[in-house]
Each structure stands twice: as structure tokens, then as C-alpha cells.
Image (cartoon, rainbow, N blue to C red):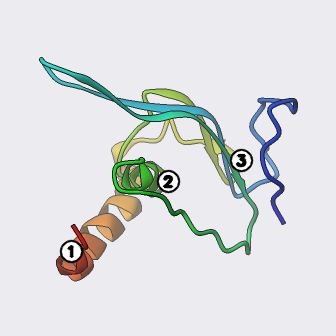
Amino acid sequence: MTQPFDAGTSFAPNPEALISMRGIKKVFVTDEVETHALVEVHLDIQQGEYVAISGPSGCGKTTLLSILGLLDATTEGEYLLAGEPVAGLLVAERLPGMIYGTLCTGLVGWRRTS
């Protein structure tokens, strides 16, 4: 079971985890505003673990899931998937995540609560 993140522990990604994120940031920039959707996210998920992501509207849940599903890239930080950095993945290697994300949006988009 994954333990809560302790700021005193190492910031190095955990190559043993199925998913390991360190210092993940996502900033959306427009002409008028800079929106910091994710700031310093640290996460380890082991194979076989069940994880729930919850929080109020606008807190970055969808942004985090888009990054986890390889639909979007981080602005900063390191993301390892099965011990491999995702930053260097080609578009074709991200394709399964893109297909899944598109399929899920089409199937469950009508169930949005907002």
C-alpha cells in the first residue's frame, strides 16, 4: 500500500512503482491569465492498487487524469510509467491513452455534474 507523501523523503521518482510522479506542475497560459492547475504533485501508485482522486470543482482532478492517461504533458516535473519517463514518448506511443480518453469522453461526457 502506498504511504502518504512525506516532504522529508526523497524527491527521486520511484522506479519500482507502476506510476511515479515528482514535482508535477501544469500551467495553462493565455494572453490574459496564467492558471496553475497543478503545483508540486508527488504520487506513487503500485501495481494492483486502487486509487481515487477527489476534490472540489476546479482543483485539478481532470488535469491530473489527463496527464496520467497520456492525453496531456506536464509543464514541469518527472512522470515515470512502469519505470520509463513519459516525457520522451512519441505521439504513436501515447496513442492508446489518446484513444481511451476520446472514447471515455464520448461515452460518459453526458454524465457531467457541472
Name the amino acid type tagged 3: Gly
Q: Tell me the tag on residue 87.
A: none
Count of numbered circles in the view:
3
Where's residue 10, x and y in %?
85, 30
Q: Nearer the viewer, residue 60 or 22?
A: 60
Crowd tier of the residue under label 1, counting other residues whose Cα lies within 10 Å: few below 14, some 14–19, many 20 or above: few
Name the amino acid type tagged 2: Leu
Where's residue 21, x and y in %?
64, 42
Report if the CB atoms under discs 1 and 3 are less than 8 Å apart.
no
Q: Residue at x 12, y 17 (%)?
A: 31
Whether residue 66 is situated above or below residue 105 in the rendered picture: above
Tell me how far mark 3 sits from mark 2, CA to CA: 14 Å
Pointer 3 residue = 83
Name the amino acid type tagged 1: Gly
Whether residue 93 is situated above or below residue 54 in the rendered picture: above
Q: Secondary structure at mark 3?
A: loop
Whether residue 13 is situated above or below residue 34 in the rendered picture: below
Which numbered mark, 3 or 2, is in the foreground of this view?
Answer: 2
Which numbered mark, 2 or 1, is in the foreground of this view?
Answer: 1
Where's residue 112, x and y in %?
24, 73
Left or right: where 105 falls relative to 36: left
Tell me how far mark 2 sits from mark 1, CA to CA: 19 Å
Report if the CB atoms under discs 3 and 2 are less than 8 Å apart.
no
Q: Secondary structure at mark 1?
A: helix
Which numbered mark, 1 or 3, is in the foreground of this view?
Answer: 1
Left or right: where 1 falls relative to 37: right
Left or right: where 99 falls relative to 40: left
Q: Secondary structure at mark 2?
A: helix
Where's residue 39, x and y in %?
51, 31
Pointer 2 residue = 68
Q: Earlier in the sequence, mark 1 or mark 3?
A: 3
Pointer 1 residue = 109
